[in-house]
Image (tube, rainbow, N blue to C red):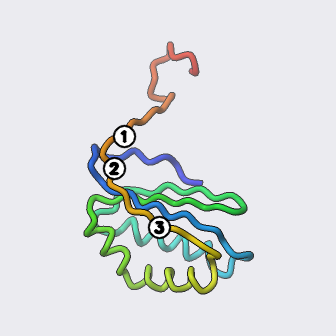
Amino acid sequence: MSDIVKMPKPPYYAVIFSSERTKGDRGYGAMADKMVELASQQEGFLGIESARDEGLGITVSYWKSLEAIQQWKEHAAHLVAQRRGKEEWYTRFSLRVCKVERQSFFDVSEMDENHPLK
């Protein structure tokens, strides 16, 4: 599980990837780590949040523009991962691209010492 990412002021874009995995790793973990590493080096990448239980995984990546998303979609190593995902790692998945127009963020550690949760 990753941390909650603090984002710049909207608008920006979120790519929501929800998936159900096949059994076994077969290189999935290493490839997932490599994709995060490569995506974070791409122009327009803002951050990523991910969570997975035994059945459902949800990864949300954040981007400055639709063009940045398209460039990542077409990245050579990402194309390999997409192919392997369909052939080896996923029983099904969905991908949604959304424009973020409003956000809010709460972090109790940023509250003063009088906050009731501190």
Element marked by disc 3: strand
Residue 60 location, x and y as percent? 47, 58
According to the picture, the residue beneath numbered tag 3 turns out to be 95
Residue at which label 1 appears: 103
11 displayed left or right of 38: left
Q: Quadrant of the C terminus?
A: top right
Callout 1 touching callout 2 (CB < 8 Å) = yes
Q: Who is closer to the viewer here, 63 or 115? A: 63
Q: Quadrant of residue 30?
A: bottom right
Residue 66 % position (x, y): 28, 65
* 115 to 82, vertically: above or below: above
Q: Amino acid at mark 1?
A: Gln
Q: Earlier in the sequence, mark 2 or mark 3?
A: 3
Q: Is residue 113 left or right of residue 9?
A: right
- Identity of the residue drawn at 41% across and 62% down: 15
- Residue 12 spot, x, y in % from top left: 29, 53
Identified at 43% across, 60% down, the residue is 61
Q: Residues within 10 Å of mark 3 (few under 14, many from 20)?
A: few
Q: Residue 103's x, y, as percent? A: 36, 40
Which residue bears the numbered disc 2?
100
Q: Amino acid at mark 2?
A: Val
Dot 3 amino acid type = Leu
Circle 1 packing at 10 Å, graded few (<14), some (14-19), many (20+), is: few
Q: Is residue 69 left or right of residue 1?
A: left
